[in-house]
Image (cartoon, rainbow, N blue to C red):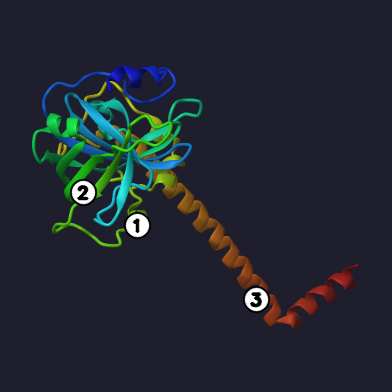
Amino acid sequence: MALEEYKRKRDFKQTPEPPPKLAKGGQRRFVVQKHRASRLHYDFRLEMDGVLKSWAVPKGPSLDPADKRLAMQVEDHPVSYFDFEGIIPAGNYGAGTVMVWDVGTWEPQGDVHEMMRKGDLKFRLNGQKLKGDFALIHMKARRPGSKGTEWLLIKHRDAYDQPGYDIDKYDFSVLTKRSLKQIAGDEDSAAWKSSRKASTVGGSNKNDWLAESIAKADAKKAKATKTSSGVKAASIAAKRTTKRALSDPSGAVKKNSALRTRA
């Protein structure tokens, strides 16, 4: 699949996603983006031939070799999509919240193009959450109406496998440490400049583009905490006043008596 399909599906005047552009160089990076669109899924992307080869994985990748995750191959994405995190506005293709769930490098276990042709891509991941040997296996048997895009993402047994792996325990961005809900509630997350260069793994500036929105989010959180503290303090003071009145009813009686006398 080429970037023409990526371009056809998007209006770049309406979405903060990066425009289609082939990248130069031969880096081998990967990214997994947690994406709540019409349905929650994970986008698994491998940098290859100047684009990000992409698969939508409904249940997400697993470190348990017993899990055979369905992975639907989708259109290639530009390499600049590597660190895209934010909100795709309603009315656009893929509308919803995107989190950079994991990033790292990958190493093919053989000739990449030959393995892709055969539908048996073996590789090793060195990410922050995903590590070790994996395979993407193209499903030969096609169901009625199938487009032939079904693959299986499988973890091989090695030093990094984790039986019973629970992906829901890792709901945080490797870039900003925010959960998907926190990103969805922060409109500043969508402020994304498509003209900037894609980051490199381990680069000193890979989080610079998010620094402003993170600072704003922290300020909002601090303000909310301060307001909450003020309300709590007022509530405590009111409770103490009520408690004193209840513990000294005679004082209340005298006060009421004085009021009647004045009347």
Secondary structure type for disc 3: helix
Could you tell me which residue is drawn at 30 percent across and 22 percent down?
194
Residue 54, placed above or below residue 18? below
Residue 118, position as x, y percentages in the image: 18, 33
Q: Earlier in the sequence, mark 2 or mark 3?
A: 2
Q: What residue type is labelled 2?
A: Gln
Q: Which of marks 1 and 2 is nearer the N terminus?
A: 2
Find residue 243 and name its label: 3
Find residue 1 and name its label: none
* Quadrant (top left/top right/bottom left/bottom right) for the C terminus: bottom right
Closer to the eye: label 2 or 3? 2
Residue 161, placed above or below residue 13? below
Q: Residues within 10 Å of mark 3 (few under 14, many from 20)?
A: few
Secondary structure type for disc 2: loop
Quadrant of the rendered image containing residue 250: bottom right
Q: Answer left or right for 251 relative to 91.
A: right
Q: Can residue 200 be seen in this view?
A: no
Residue 184, placed above or below residue 92? below
Find residue 128 and name its label: 2
Q: Mark 1 points at which residue?
A: 169
Quadrant of the rendered image containing residue 27: top left
Secondary structure type for disc 1: helix
Could you tell me which residue is drawn at 29 percent across and 26 percent down?
77
Q: Can you name the residue that lies furthest to the left here?
A: 110
Q: What residue type is labelled 3?
A: Lys
Q: Which of marks 3 and 1 is nearer the N terminus?
A: 1
Query: Along the line of sight, which residue is nearer the eye, 231 or 187?
Result: 187
Q: Answer left or right for 233 relative to 221.
A: right
Quadrant of the rendered image containing residue 15: top left
Q: Residues within 10 Å of mark 2 (few under 14, many from 20)?
A: few
Q: Can you name the residue that lies furthest to the right here?
A: 263
